[in-house]
Amino acid sequence: MALFLGMLVVFALSVRMAGGRLLRLGDLRFKHTWLLLGALGVQFSLFKLFSNERHAIQPVLYLLSYGMGGAFLWVNRKMPGLWLVGVGALLNGTAIAVNGGIMPGAASAFAAAHLTAAPSEFVNSRALVDARLLFLGDVFAVPGWLPIHNVFSIGDLCILLGAFIGLHRGAGSRLLPSGTGQFSGLVRERNFIRLWGAQAISNQGDWVYTLGVVASLARRGLGAETLAMMVVMQAAPRAVASALGGPIVDRFNRRRIMVVADIVRAGAVLSLLVSPDPSLHHLYAVAAVLGLFAALFQPCLQASIPNVVPAERLVAANALVSATFQLAIMVGPLVGALLVSHLGLRPAFAVNAASFLLSGALVAGVKLPHGRPAQSDDEPTARQALVEGFRFATRTPVVRGILLVTGMIMFAAAIRNPLEPLFVLRVLHSDSGALGLPPAVWGLGMLLGSTAAPAAARKWSCERMLTFSVAIVGVAVLCASRSVMLSSLLGLWLMAGSGNAVGTIAYQSLLQYRTPDRLRGRIVAASETVLDVAYLAGVTLAGWLGGHVGLRTAIAVAGVCFLLAALAGRLVLGKGTRVAADEAAASVALQDEQEQDHERARARVPGRAPIPVPVPLQASPFVDHAVEVAALRTELFAALRREQDLLDEVARLSGPTAALERELVASLGQATSDVLQAAQDAARDLVERAERQAERVAHSPLPAGTRRRPTDPRALAAFDQLRAARGESAPEPIAVVRLIPIG
């Protein structure tokens, strides 16, 4: 409690520093505040008044207080930050409920915080021997040498972060950008909801199946070499298919590709149910099929997201996909363990097959643009399509930079991942029961980062988000290499996981923003290939580093690689701007719309080749008006591209002649000035002669048989204009006359 109150004081001071007004918090109106007061009263009574003796009713009352607090948070869920407080309370309540009314804690965290509790004393947290869901318990510690030392959980961090957000938003602070409405707006995008649901269900089934396969290998008495071979059998076909399957994703209907991939994978997994004890070669074959068709499904999914959500919600869509993927990593193995331990291997395989079938059913209802017709004469071959994608990736600075930076990131992650368990056991001297904590905390950090990414994207560009998040990961990993206790490592892993999620969402969104739809499948597949190659290289180096330079140095090398990736991102991608990102998205969307309209127009006239020039309607009575419009738009975009190419060529050629051009302009300017001066002098002389002549005529006697004609206004106006050109003031009017005969 003291730690929580101290943090609230710090948060209040930060509100003042960020320009907020704490008095504005008085305008907030909460509902059913008696629920919150009752929950706090119950907890105060349990831990301050009646904590000396343990009774059976105390855990029940403790859970009841969480229920009352959860009800208060639910009725006030629209208040800023309270949803995150509710997430933290739910995580804490879950850990307490599965451990009999006691919050589990790590022994290392209690030792670091110098906390001990008597066996007869009722406390809200205790180091249990057989703790369940320990990663949700009090695994972090504030060191004992600090005045406010205590242990805390990931749920406590969520509660503090929610309070921080609520204080700043309620007080009108300028510190935090708002992400309100980003996720809720996606609910109205039915096609995206179907894609997202298919991905979420399929991922859950994948991780249930993974644990089932591991359990099957363990029952056979097989070791790590067989498991590694299983990973290779799935990863190798995936890498090859990612490199060569990009043209398939761009040429054919992506919805059909995803449905076929789900059906084939479901059939492969169902084949394991035919035999009560599948052979090892059967498992290898299924792994190869899963890897091969996953390499087609994933690029189709990533390339289709921009087709089903508006550009302004693309970051939120990627964040939701990333969050559900991390949730599947955390929940799937738990569900798989329950199924395998209670029902055996076959239910785990059946769940994965059912997840593929359900995923295919959801994807079948998604409306996506059709791919390019394969029967057209102008369609490029597979080799030409690969070359086209390669040229776009290498000649587009943003795409080239993303592939470089993400490859460096994956290389660094591949060094860290396999050495993490050894670091926990041999360097931090933790027991084997703590091996699941670091990846679980990293995954929780990725969940938090996924929820924060849409709000960050409203204020910062994707380029800046990527660079900053990778730098955070690098600093965290570098500091973790010097950790001496597990609790400090977990705190750093939470920060690194958040940065990992934001960086992943940023690079995916940036790649989708800057790639036209006709090439997006190939570019996403190329990105997957770069990641696979970088991962294999990093794993290979990790083994050598761990055996020759030590685990601490190897983890430090991974941190340095992350920082180098952040530096490379800053150099090759720059800061970026929100306006630039929006304009790029609008440009890509316009180009995609033009291409889709053209394809739809061609589809109305089967077998007709693309129209290179507009055809008059009178000359082609069978050509639909839509074809004419599409042809005109095609010619317009082609002309614009040719114009841009010419401008680029002019700019390139004009570089060496810049000095000559400046000299020529100066010479022309001087010549023009001389000509104007001569013209002004000639005009002045002409005016003076005209005035003298008019004056002589006005005062001379009239010849016989003539009379004077009144002054011509047009002549006066002409003289005034000439005098104005000379910069002289107008004199007294002079009668300009013309002699005309009388009668």
Image (cartoon, rainbow, N blue to C red):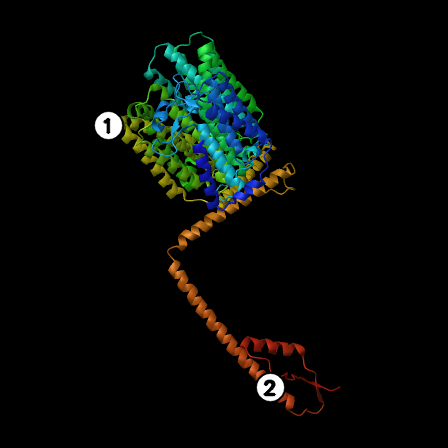
Q: Residues within 10 Å of mark 1 (few under 14, many from 20)?
A: few
Side of 2 where 732 appears, left or right: right
Side of 250 where 709 appears, left or right: right
For residue 264, say whether it is visible. Answer: no
Look at the picture and state if 262 lies above or below 593. above
Count of picture labels: 2
Give the residue type that dot 2 points to.
Answer: Gln
Look at the picture and state if 191 lies above or below 211. below
Residue at image mark 1: 548
Indicate which disc, 2 or 1, sits on the residue closer to the N terminus.
Answer: 1
Which numbered disc, 2 or 1, marks the residue closer to the eye? Answer: 1
- Percent across and percent down for residue 21 are 52, 45
- Percent across and percent down for residue 321 are 49, 29
Residue at image mark 2: 693
The tag on residue 150 is: none
For residue 320, say whether it is visible. Answer: yes
